[in-house]
Image: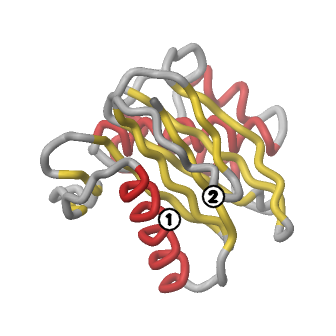
């Protein structure tokens, strides 16, 4: 099962970090997972006994958390949740606030494959869809953003899902990848 929770918080780095881990801990408790959250050398958070795979992201005033596990869990107490029936697997999640004046060409040239660049240049929403898919794949593999250019195209990849999220503070794109 794949669970993605998201919410808004104060727009400071400390608040976003704390809110993301608070959200993650609520999800883990609901799943009956008490293991401590650790960080790999790459910075990817993980649960030591592999009972679940996790990923966190934040942008603007939004935070999100993805949890992939075998069990069906009740997360109805969370206000915003996406649930997909899927097998437990390594997961990466990315959320980005849509910022109209971002230098899309510079980022696309640096990180996107040729086919992704063609799609991304059509409009800002397409750019963010490609960008969040790339980041979510990088997080799922644990290799990080520096590896984005070396990854294959995300356009026709199974196991990557993208959602448009509208929150009071703006519009966001959220992507999650399962490996």
* Position of 9 relative to 160 (above/below): below
In the displayed structure, does residue 121 sit left or right of residue 66?
right
SS for dot 2: loop
7 versus 121 height, above or below:
below
Q: Position of residue 179 (x, y in %)?
A: 35, 25
Which mark is on residue 154? none
N-terminal label among 1 and 2: 1
- The residue labelled by disc 2 is 78
- Tell me residue 29's x, y (percent): 37, 59
Residue pictured at 54% horizontal, 35% vertical: 112
- Who is closer to the viewer here, 167 or 101? 167
Element type at marker 1? helix
How crowded pointer 2 is (Cα within 10 Å; few <14, some 14-19, many 20+) is rated as few
Residue 84 higher or lower than 55, as above or below: above
Would you place residue 109 above or below residue 153 in this image? Answer: below
Q: Residue at x 43, y 53 (%)?
A: 30
Percent x, y of residue 103? 70, 57
Colouring mode (rainbow / by chain / secondary structure / one colour): secondary structure
In contact (CB < 8 Å): disc 1 and disc 2:
yes
Left-right relation of 25 to 102? left
x and y percentages locating residue 47 in the rendered image: 22, 52
The image's mark for residue 23 is: 1
Instruction: Identify which residue is drawn at 52% across, 23% down.
Output: 85
Report crowding for label 1: few under 14, some 14 to 19, many 20 or more residues within 10 A (C-alpha): some
Label 1, label 2: how many angstroms apart (C-alpha)?
9 Å
Front of the two marks 1 and 2: 2
Quadrant of the image containing the N terminus? top left
Q: Residue at x 58, y 52 (%)?
A: 5
Pick whichever, 110 or 56, lies toward us: 56
Between residue 52 and residue 151, name the one nearer to us.
52
Q: How many marks?
A: 2
């Amino acid at each position: 099962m794949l669970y993605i929770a998201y919410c808004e918080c104060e727009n400071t780095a400390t608040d976003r970090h704390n809110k993301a881990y608070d959200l993650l801990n609520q999800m883990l408790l609901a799943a009956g997972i008490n293991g401590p959250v650790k960080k790999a050398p790459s910075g990817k958070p993980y649960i030591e006994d592999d009972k679940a795979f996790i990923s966190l992201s934040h942008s603007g005033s939004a935070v999100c958390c993805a949890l992939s596990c075998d069990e069906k869990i009740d997360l109805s107490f969370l206000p915003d949740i996406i649930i997909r029936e899927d097998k437990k697997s390594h997961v990466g999640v990315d959320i980005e606030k849509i910022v109209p004046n971002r230098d899309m060409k510079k980022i696309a040239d640096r990180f996107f494959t040729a086919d992704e660049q063609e799609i991304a240049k059509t409009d800002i929403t397409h750019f963010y869809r490609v960008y969040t898919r790339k980041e979510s794949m990088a997080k799922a593999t644990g290799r990080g953003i520096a590896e984005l250019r070396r990854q294959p195209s995300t356009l026709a990849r199974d196991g990557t899902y993208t959602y448009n999220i509208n929150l009071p503070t703006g519009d966001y794109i959220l992507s999650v990848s399962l490996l």
